Amino acid sequence: MYGNGSFARRLRMGRLYRPDAPGLLVVPLDHAIGAGPPACQGTLDGLAARLADGGADAVVLHKGAVSRIRPERFRTMSLVLHLNASTGLAADPDAKYPVATVAEAVRLGADAVSVHVNIGSATEDRQVAHLAATAGQCDRWGMPLLAMMYLRGPLVDDRDPAQISHALTVATELGADLVKTMLPDDPAAITRITASCPVPVLAAGGPAGDGETAVARLATALRAGAGGVAAGRTVFTAADPGAVTARLAGLVHHRALAGAR
């Protein structure tokens, strides 16, 4: 579970997980740069409190958002600093670019960093190069790396198991400790993808508004071999983010899957 690398990297990796829990529940909250202010009630700090109380293991934030959350929210929940971004207003929204560094993550007290890569996009070369450079900095600073790997472009199929496995291979070959991706619906395909990946695969939550469909899909992914869940919009757009977090935490931490079938 704790991976390889320096003592510091293994120490931080261990902080992401709960003792004796078989999986990882991450709630990405990095969507505001891309999509504008999130559609959730209350403050970011209040949302973080509900996520922590619900059992989230970690949240993903941009560096400016970190200062709007009280440090005590991270007593039982880890901070993952997101290092790249793009806006939905750009000519090419898939063209991710660096906005933070691993050194900044260390200064902010983060337990991991994350990078989003759109395989098949027009700027894939720059994004993969940024992932590789970030992995090198993670080696230097002893920081775990979560790679968010998506298939986006005219020549790719984001539901093709072989292409999903290829995207994950790019991440692991370049040094990622964890990967997040949209998994297909077929449990057998999920099993093949996760079995062939040498690091834990976190199932992405998908678009907002899926509700019960998203929870059922994530439960299927966990049964088929996913190492956890990374669900943002499924959680923070819900009427009760804390309740959705608690439900996902039950699935991830206790494999309470019988009731989700």
Image: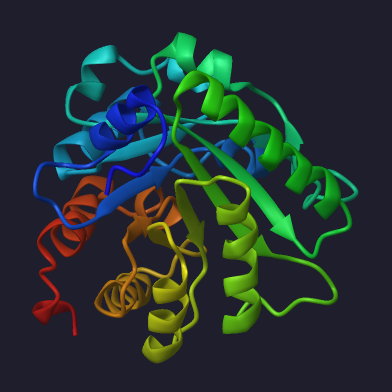
Q: Position of residue 72 (x, y in %)?
A: 21, 16
Instruction: From the top left corner, tell me how far across and down residue 125 is, in percent.
Output: 84, 50
Image position of 7 with respect to 22: above or below: above
Image height of 43 relative to 70, above or below: below
Q: Is residue 218 left or right of residue 173?
A: left
Image: 170 above or below 147: below
Q: Is residue 173 left or right of residue 215?
A: right
Q: Is residue 214 left or right of residue 246?
A: right
At 81% from the left and 68% from the top, the residue drawn is 153
Name the foreground residue: 45 vs 134.
134
Q: Residue at x 24, y 22 (%)?
A: 73
User: In this rendering, does residue 250 appear at all?
Assistant: yes
Where residue 163 appears, as percent x and y from the top left, is: 66, 77
Camera-side residue of 248 and 40: 248
Left or right placement of residue 251 versus residue 6 in this view? left
Q: Quadrant of residue 8?
A: top left
Quadrant assignment for the C terminus: bottom left
Say above or below: 259 vs 150: below
Pick out the residue farthest to the top: 107
Q: How many marks?
A: 0
* Colour scheme in use: rainbow
- Of the pair 110 and 154, the residue shown nearer to us: 110
The answer to whether residue 64 of the structure is visible from this angle is no
Q: Which image quarter: residue 220?
A: bottom left
Q: Position of residue 118 (x, y in %)?
A: 71, 56
Residue at x 21%, y 46% (from the top left corner): 242
